[in-house]
Image (cartoon, rainbow, N blue to C red):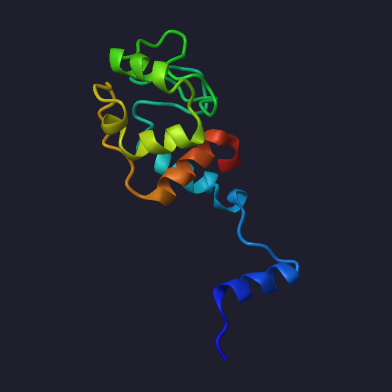
Amino acid sequence: MRISLSMMFGALIVAGLSAPTAALADGDAVAGAKVFKKCAACHTATEEKNKVGPHLVGIIDRPIASVEGYKYSKAMTEHAAEVPTWTVEALNAYLHNPKGVVKGTKMAFAGLKKDDDIENVIAYLKDPAAAK
């Protein structure tokens, strides 16, 4: 007997189960804290203190290039005019390839290559306290 994927999905719905939601794919803050160690030489996510790079406290949905006291590159301020907010999608793209997204950025980091690492770092940035 052959069962199609649509029949299986329909059976899950009838049984009261559903397909995975976006909330389940949000990443793991604990794993993200470990990956964030690659970022910690230049950034902090737990205190509003700039290092080589700006602090990342409250970065999700924060305007790009907006941290007081941090001197952003011209490239980043120009990017902020095009993409004004650090949405999850904007962070995802930037963390994959910083220099490809913001040509001329001061950030020397090449980016994170694994989607899971990016999801986990974003989960950590959303709530660093969840990693404790």
Looking at this view, is 89 or 110 the one in front? 89
Examine the rendered structure and indicate whether residue 79 appears above or below residue 92: above
* x and y, in percent, of residue 122 in the image: 49, 39
Looking at this view, is 4 or 65 the one in front? 4
Give the quadrant of the N terminus: bottom right
Q: Indicate the quadrant where residue 6 lies.
A: bottom right
- Residue at x-position 60% and y-position 41%: 130
Give the quadrant of the C terminus: top right
Q: Indicate the quadrant where residue 94 lies.
A: top left
Q: Indicate the quadrant where residue 38 lies.
A: top left
* x and y, in percent, of residue 34 in the image: 43, 44
Left or right of 98, for residue 1: right
* x and y, in percent, of residue 100 in the image: 27, 33
Count numbered badges in the picture: 0
Examine the rendered structure and indicate whether residue 121 appears above or below residue 58: below
- Residue at x-position 38% and y-position 31%: 40
Is residue 132 visible in the rendered structure shown here? no
Given the current orientation, which residue lies at the most extreme bottom position? 1
Left or right of 7, for residue 36: left
- Residue at x-position 56% and y-position 35%: 126
Is residue 105 visible in the rendered structure shown here? yes
- Residue at x-position 62% and y-position 75%: 8
Left or right of 18, for residue 59: left
Looking at this view, is 3 or 26 the one in front? 3
Looking at this view, is 86 or 55 the one in front? 86
Given the current orientation, which residue lies at the most extreme top position? 69
